[in-house]
């Protein structure tokens, strides 16, 4: 099909390959497939880098092998070509037509009026005494709160199976999130409890039995590919919090007691992990010495910046700035998630879709790439009027992981404060109030000291 004809390398009319492509595309649009196909073949033979021409050429045949060959060439010319990627994914079975959303659209939001019935995937009860089991990160097993029995849980490192961002954004999965309340029937005592949207691990408030639940909406959500186990226990987190709250002279004396009123709550939160290459296109005036004067000329360059495991929280209730202060997390410790890991530990499904998380992550990576590019461009050169002309995002993949944290919200002097503790490192992040009386006292003492120094200076100079 694509054997090169030496005479076809140059169009007899003198048209450029782009002009030949545009004419061929117009003929295909008008229904003249045969003539349009010949012109499109001529265009790609003259210029193999015309990705759009390859895609339109694929439209002129019903043979899937030919279509795939054309799309291979299109993606070789432009790996980020959206239409070629979408079509290739359909041809290879990576995407199903029924899962796709409309071009440029998003999946319709779903918010059930009534709680969805959730079934227990696993109920964590001790086989010896019937007591509730809880996962113990120190022993990596399920421990019974009543008899102390321990059941080992085998651990496997999480597979680094990143998924393609652009392909997932073509599907409903990329745009939906947990919205349904869950109605859970306890397998031990039969009590019915309604849990908030997205709460994957549950504990019966009547008998304390723990379970990992499944609701109908879970089938539409992206499942976590890894979990970082909690490493900081209640005693340790209390110690870290106490040291953080008491740090600084201006902290109120009763701050720790106020913060303890609501306590710290453990949780596994869903977090999106992005890998991406960002190409920054920039222009600037470059100065070069010519004798005693400096000559300037505009230069246009680009720089590739790569980012690995850029974290983006998947829950709306967690302020991004607070999460950033609690980093880093040791992602090398991610293990393959199992329901047993969540026995007795609250865990949430994401309510921040992949589409929304991608927008914020791309913005942050673009800003970081701009700073890095400008710093590198200006090193050792006279650069003026640095301007970024745009960004290309390529090779973007993602994973969803569950990360351990401890959360607390408390009120002091009528103002609400949030505290987040990294469940791996114990690092505390948050804001805390200042004691106004201490501040006033320090300011007053400083003023007294200044006045005393002035008076002393005057006395020594004989001015008084």
Image (tube, rainbow, N blue to C red):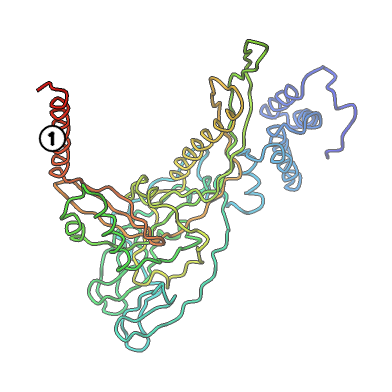
- 351 relative position to 101: left or right: left
Name the quarter where the C terminus is drawn.
top left
Asked if 324 appears above or below 30 in the picture, the reply is below
- The one nearer the camera, 463 or 123, is 463
Q: Position of residue 150 (x, y in %)?
A: 40, 83
Could you say whether the residue bearing mark 1 is in a helix, strand or loop? helix
Q: Quadrant of residue 209?
A: bottom left
- 182 relative position to 142: left or right: left
Name the quarter where the N terminus is drawn.
top right
Asked if 218 appears above or below 317 in the picture, the reply is below
Q: Quadrant of residue 137?
A: bottom left
Task: Please tell me how crowded label 1 is: few (under 14), some (14-19), or many (20+) other residues with Cα within 10 Å.
Answer: few
- 106 relative position to 234: left or right: right
In the displayed image of the protein, which residue is found farthest to the left? 464
Q: How many marks?
A: 1
Q: Position of residue 122 (x, y in %)?
A: 40, 74
Residue drawn at point x = 46 percent, y = 50 percent? 311
Q: Position of residue 357 (x, y in %)?
A: 44, 45
In the displayed image of the protein, which residue is found farthest to the top? 292
- The one nearer the camera, 362 or 380, is 380
Residue drawn at point x = 40 percent, y = 67 percent? 231
Residue drawn at point x = 57 percent, y = 45 percent? 396
Q: Quadrant of residue 427?
A: bottom left
Q: Position of residue 177 (x, y in %)?
A: 40, 52
In the displayed image of the protein, which residue is found farthest to the right? 6
Residue drawn at point x = 66 percent, y = 40 percent? 79
- The one nearer the camera, 185 or 364, is 364
Q: Which residue is mark 1?
A: 448
- The one nearer the camera, 404 or 434, is 434
Asked if 195 appears above or below 163 in the picture, the reply is below
- 446 relative position to 10: left or right: left
């Amino acid at each position: 099909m694509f054997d090169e004809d030496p005479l076809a390398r140059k169009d007899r009319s003198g048209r450029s390959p782009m002009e030949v492509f545009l004419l061929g595309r117009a003929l295909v649009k008008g229904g003249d497939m045969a003539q349009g196909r010949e012109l499109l073949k001529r265009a790609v033979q003259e210029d193999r880098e015309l990705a759009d021409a390859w895609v339109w050429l694929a439209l002129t045949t019903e043979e899937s092998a030919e279509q795939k060959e054309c799309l291979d060439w299109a993606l070789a010319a432009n790996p980020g070509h959206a239409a070629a990627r979408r079509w290739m994914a359909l041809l290879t079975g990576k995407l199903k037509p029924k899962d796709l959303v409309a071009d440029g659209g998003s999946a319709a939001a779903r918010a059930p009026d009534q709680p969805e019935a959730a079934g227990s995937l696993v109920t964590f009860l001790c086989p010896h005494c019937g007591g509730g089991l809880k996962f113990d990160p120190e022993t990596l097993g399920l421990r019974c709160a009543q008899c102390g029995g321990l059941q080992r849980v085998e651990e496997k490192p999480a597979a680094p199976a990143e998924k393609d961002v652009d392909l997932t954004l073509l599907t409903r999965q990329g745009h939906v999130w947990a919205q349904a309340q869950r109605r859970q029937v306890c397998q031990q005592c039969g009590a019915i409890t309604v849990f908030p949207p997205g709460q994957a691990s549950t504990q019966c408030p009547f008998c304390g039995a723990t379970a990992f639940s499944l609701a109908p909406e879970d089938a539409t959500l992206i499942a976590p590919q890894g979990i970082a186990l909690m490493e900081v226990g209640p005693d340790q987190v209390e110690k870290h919090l106490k040291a953080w709250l008491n740090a600084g002279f201006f902290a109120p004396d009763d701050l720790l007691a106020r913060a303890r009123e609501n306590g710290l709550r453990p949780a596994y939160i869903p977090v999106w992990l992005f890998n991406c290459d960002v190409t920054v296109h920039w222009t600037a005036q470059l100065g070069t010495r010519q004798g005693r004067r400096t000559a300037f000329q505009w230069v246009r360059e680009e720089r590739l910046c790569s980012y690995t495991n850029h974290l983006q929280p998947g829950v709306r209730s967690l302020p991004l700035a607070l999460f950033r202060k609690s980093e880093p997390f040791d992602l090398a410790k991610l293990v393959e998630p199992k329901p047993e890991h969540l026995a007795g530990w609250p865990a949430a499904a994401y309510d921040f879709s992949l589409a929304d998380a991608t927008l914020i992550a791309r913005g942050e990576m673009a800003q970081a790439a701009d700073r890095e590019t400008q710093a590198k461009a200006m090193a050792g050169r006279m650069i003026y009027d640095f301007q970024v002309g745009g960004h290309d995002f390529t090779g973007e993949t993602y994973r969803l992981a569950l990360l351990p944290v401890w959360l607390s919200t408390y009120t002091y002097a009528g103002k609400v404060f949030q505290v987040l503790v990294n469940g791996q490192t114990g690092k505390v992040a948050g804001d805390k109030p200042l004691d106004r009386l201490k501040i006033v006292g320090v300011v007053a003492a400083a003023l007294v000291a200044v006045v005393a120094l002035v008076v002393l200076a005057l006395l020594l100079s004989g001015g008084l």
